Image: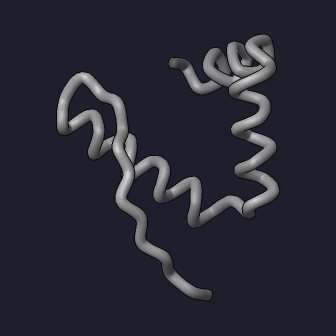
Amino acid sequence: MNKYQYEISIEAKSESEAEAKMKALTVLASRLSEKELTKLAHVIKHDPVKTALAKKYLGV
């Protein structure tokens, strides 16, 4: 599989929070397919009920 590098900006309260977000995004990108990531983003953007349920399940 090919690797691609991107320069991105992440909104966060601190640099350590931004680094934690990047690490989490990297794990998601490596473990989920393009289709799965796209569906996840769609749910988070357009379905607050499912997003709230997922957060409750995760304890956050």
Q: What residue do we see at 61% from left, 87% from top?
A: 1
Residue 7: x and y in percent read: 36, 59
- As drawn, the residue found furthest toward the left would be 15
Rendered view: 39 above or below 32: above
Rendered view: 17 above or below 32: above
Could you tell whether 39 is left or right of 26 in the image?
A: right
Residue 18: x and y in percent read: 29, 39
How many marks are shown on the rendered structure? 0
Q: Nearer the viewer, residue 43 or 52?
A: 43
Image colouring: one colour
Q: What residue do we see at 80% from left, 43% from top?
A: 39
What is the quadrant of residue 13 in the picture?
A: top left
Q: What residue do we see at 63% from left, 63% from top?
A: 31
Q: Nearer the viewer, residue 52 or 10?
A: 10
Residue 29: x and y in percent read: 58, 59
Residue 22: x and y in percent read: 38, 49
